[in-house]
Image (cartoon, grey):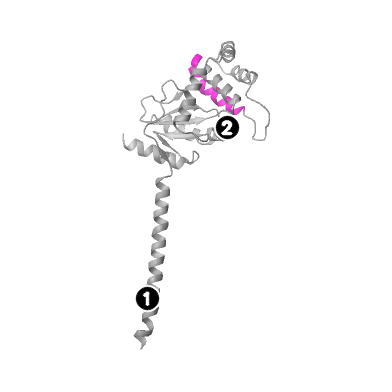
Amino acid sequence: MSKSNNSPFKMVVMITLIVVALFVALVILNNRNSDSNHDTTFDQQPPIEGQPMQGNSDAPVTVVEFGDFKCPSCKIWGETIYPKLISDYVDTGKVKFSYINVLFHGEESKLGSLAAESVYKESPNSYWKFHKELFNAQPNENHDGLWITNEKILEIAKTIPGIDTQQLQKDLENESGLAEVNKDAKLVEEFKIQFTPSIMVNGTMLEDPFDYDQMKSLIEKELEGN
């Protein structure tokens, strides 16, 4: 009698345990799938020939930022993540870093990119200083007016040794860097850039550009493969 009464109860317990086990397995599988799709890998990385570059040109890992001088998040990335990347990997010769212009904010983005391309062409050693100072000049997010203007660009350029401001002014008037800016625009389209900053490590696009641990993991994995 006791055995007969316990059998249905045991069956219910077993079924419950099986259901729970299946649920846990599904959760784990889903998490693994989410992890595997965390980043997007392309067949190739963006070509950086002719692009501004920092680090050893023979470094086995390439990190590329698709950025916009008008983008507040790009400014924050440059203040928080970029210094770590430079210190940990670029200065040690393991990574080379390059920047590709994105024009998500219209004419100001274009003007900033044209200025940067001109500085890079005329005085490559002054580029990264100009790059940093142009981002530093970006006002807070509540600023509604235009701020990337010819006047602001020349004002910044005058503070940086090596930049010929008269040549820069001519380049801006003639849009001398337009071919390079258009080249970047094609890369933005080719690599389906949806937001800035977008960060790629040897052809793999980070889902979260501010996840430095994930960036380090990708870099270390690439270094192990070389």
- Disc 2 designates what residue? 71
Q: Which of the 4 quarters of the picture holds residue 89? A: top left
Q: Residue at x 64, y 30 (%)?
A: 139
Q: Is residue 113 left or right of residue 93?
A: right
Residue 212 sits above or below residue 179 on the image: below
Amino acid type indicated by mark 2: Cys
Residue 38, placed above or below residue 13? above
The kind of residue on which mark 1 rests is Met
Instruction: Measure how far apart labels 2 and 1 are at the Cα level.
Output: 61 Å
Mark earlier in primary sequence (2, 1): 1
The C terminus appears in which quarter of the rendering?
A: top left
* Residue 88 at least partly seen: no
For the N terminus, the quadrant is bottom left
Q: Give the percent coordinates (x, y) of residue 28.
A: 40, 56
Identified at 38% across, 67% down, the residue is: 18
Instruction: Give the main secondary structure, helix, strand or loop, of the magenta stretch.
Output: helix
Which mark is on residue 11? 1
Q: In what element is the residue under mark 2?
A: loop
Please say if 222 is above or below 25. above
Q: Position of residue 56 (x, y in %)?
A: 39, 25
Crowd around label 1: few <14 · some 14–19 · many ≥20 (10 Å): few
Residue 138: x and y in percent read 62, 29
Instruction: Give the camera-side residue of 54 and 69.
Output: 69
Q: Which residues are magenta?
A: 121-137
Q: Position of residue 151 (x, y in %)?
A: 65, 18
Which residue is located at x 55 percent, y 33 percent? Answer: 74
